[in-house]
Image (cartoon, helix red, strand yellow):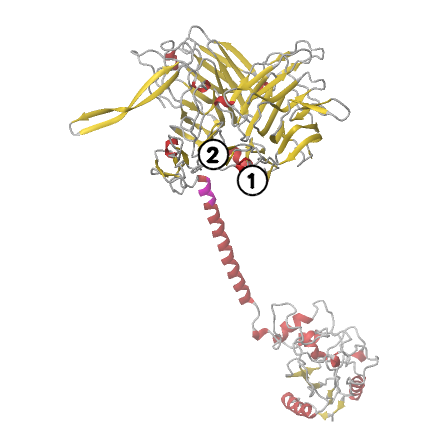
Amino acid sequence: MVGIDECLFERRHCEGSCTNHVEIHNRTPYTVSVNKTALVGVRLNTSAECVCKARTFSREETCRTHHCYNGGRCVDTRSGPRCVACPVGYNGPRCQQTTRSFRGNGWAWYPALQLCEQSHLSLEFITKEADGLILYNGPIVPPKQDEYLLRDFISIELEQGYPRLLIDFGSGTLELRVKTKKTLDDGVWHRLDVFWDSENVRMVIDFCRSAEVFEMEDGSAPEFDDNSCQARGLIPPFSEALNLNVPLQLGGIYRQHFDQTLYHWQYAFTSKGFDGCIRNLIHNSEHYDLAFPALARNSYPACPQTDEVCLKTEHTARCWEQGNCVASLVQAKCYCRPGWTGLSCNFPTIPTTFKPQSYVKFALSFDPDRFSTQLQLRFRTREQQGELFRVSDQHQREYAILELSRGHLQLRFNLNSLRAEEKRLQLNAIAVNDGQWHVVRFNRYGSAAMLELDGGEGRRYNETYNFAGHQWLSIDKQEGVYAGGKAEYTGLKTFEVQSDFQRSCLDDIRLDGKHLPLPPSINGTQWGQATMARNLERNCPSNRPCSNVICPDPFDCVDLWNEYECTCSEGRIMSADTKGCVDRNECLDLPCLNGATCINLEPRLRYRCICAEGYWGENCELMQESQRLKLSMGALGAIFICLVIILILSLLFVLYNRKRKTTKKKRAGPEKDVRETVISYDDEGGGEDDMTAFDITPLQIPIGAGGNMPPDIATCKMPIIYPVMTLLPGQEVNVGFLMEERKKRFDKDPNAPPFDDLRNFTFEGSGSIAESLSSLASGAYRHTPTTVATTSFMHCTDDENQDYNYLTGWGPRFNALAAMYVHHDRTKLTRVVATNEVAITSAAAAIKASTTPNMLAVSTGMVVGSNSGMLTKTTAAVIEEEDEDEEDEDEEEGNVAL
């Protein structure tokens, strides 16, 4: 990076441009022998050439002089070497990495700027910070007293959002500032160009698109106010060149601390680092490769800040395959590679062959910008002359024409509608009529124009960058846009195409970034229509020149598109006597990078690279990063928060389970639950399905007593009247004896349930308002003074409402059951009246016959559970209670409860 520089001092070897030429002597290497140690080195000779290397095209260009970066493969073609198979993300014309990111505290070192009499330095940047050093090339150590003071430097920075340039040729520091309409720290890409020669310096921002232009229709001199985009200055005498032999630093500065006044600079540059991204650093049409700087800190390839924006939408995330995502910090857009189109660049374009007397006329559906014009297209041809594309006004006085001139590319444009002020740009150092596909780009901003071919580097680039004269180009949308030549009608049905682009192909025409249709494949897009087209053919086939050619051994016929050549197959070259083919040594092209060793293989396999430690890839272009797990403080904090949340949830789960178990233990046990045959189910409605498919017709008994019933359904029978047992005065009833006697009597009673056709149902007490406890109200009793009446009958329905207030008198063991059925706001007990008329009559007769006011009637009933068939013994006692609100005759009337 920093070596012997014969161009360091002005006028020692050259008056203007100067380039170091290094020559290697293979015959006599350097040899140093000390005792038992011998050192052998390459003998180099460095000399000064008074030319600008970047703009000298006299030497033949081959893959040995035109090497590819980052593992790209160089291929020699008839139009010069080309770099193919570039890795993903390396978009430069020679597979350069064009973008670099910085975080405000970093920097990166690259080779110094070369000395040219006329220089052009350009770059693009994006940031949200108002201050920062973008570029610096100058001294990095304090001067020594016994050395010649070399004070040349250049710096570009942002100060409060505005660009600032400092440049010193050694005789004084020049400062240039541009007061743009808006500050440049807005998160959008901005272009900065610096031009200098031996006397003048100029800085231009964003191609001066923010300049105010006033042009009159009468063709008078226009007004061009460029104060918001351009600044000019003169170099202090008497130095004439920028002599640099120190690394070029991007994004910041790394140097030994010293007082800047030691170099007698009139202005000091900032030392604050740049926070953002820098791309497309170009000096005299040569792209810098920003992938692997000689020294760097806190700087990374590409631009992660804008890459995140590209990944937010699906179509921009996918355009990496056949396009490049160009994004600001706000929005992203896909720029398709030549030959591809679509929102995500996933559709290939279809080329068109232009035959003799062919052309296409377009009608645009958008309004082109008068100040700027961008054109891009692909073409292949064998012709010397022809017009590729033109735009013009209605009268053809203002125009821009891209054409072939003697096999070379040429651009002509005129912006004055009254007189000719034509400007031309040519690429005379390279021929384009070789039958290969070429990509051409033409950019115009006012009177400044740039012409690029196949990436635009070196001899494939030319420009004119002066804003002088007229700046607007008016384009007629209906009559001013042509491809392949302009048709002039000579008769009613005859026409002639001027500058006919014949026996050639065009593809992927874009005007101002908008795809135009190419018939016959496509006749229209959203940006325009092909209104006229003649003598066109779909695709771009060759005329098969090898069909009737037989090449002598060992040569093969190669189709070069409309031409052929008998040459060696791939991987071989012609021998020195031109009579045979030998293996081509691809290692001479130096394809292996980063100190790798190249081994030449057979023609089919070409070569193999043995990578040094820490590198990998086909050409050892990729660096292996150490496998270390690095967690930021934010990631550690997130992990800690997640662990705390998991711990809290676990504690809540444990507490919930414990509370649930405690609640279950507090529930009433079996000894307090009188519903000994009731089973609780967690599933609501569980078991209601009829799993045995029994006939439920006998259960469908009408509720009303007076309704007609089917003959096959049993009806209610009259209750059986048993003998009355007389009690002596003072004698107590033996309840156990009565229950046993009644049990035996019910067992012998044929009318008592359960019957022989006993059915099992999963829900006990269906249709009863008392659920499974409805059997408690299946009987009614009345008492007489001296006798006990025993009544047994079947109760068919539950139509009447039941009152369960009698349960409160059964004692403390029935409190739980009483709490389930008894209302707390009662004031008196409800009398229970039996629905069976026979039972009511019998009870009334017993009461009338009674002469003793205190008489206890005991009735024992047996209830058969319809679900389990289990017999339940029940004893009902009639308790006499005095009613304060009734008459005296009602005092002897008791309540009967089951």
Residue type, mark 2 in image: Cys
Locate residue 216: give its quadrant.
top right
Answer with left or right where residue 895 lies relative to residue 559: right
Locate residue 345: give its quadrant.
top right
Magenta-tinted stretch: 634-638
CB under 8 Å between discs 1 and 2: no
Q: Determine if the magenta segment contains residue 635.
A: yes
10 Å crowding of disc 1: few (<14), some (14-19), many (20+): some
Question: Which one is earlier in the sequence, the residue at label 1 or at label 2?
Answer: 1
Above or below, 127 against 643 in this view is: above
862, 886: nearer the viewer: 862
Magenta span dominant secondary structure: helix
Residue type, mark 1 in image: Arg
Residue receiving disc 1 = 318
The disc placed on residue 566 is 2
Which residue is farthest top? 237
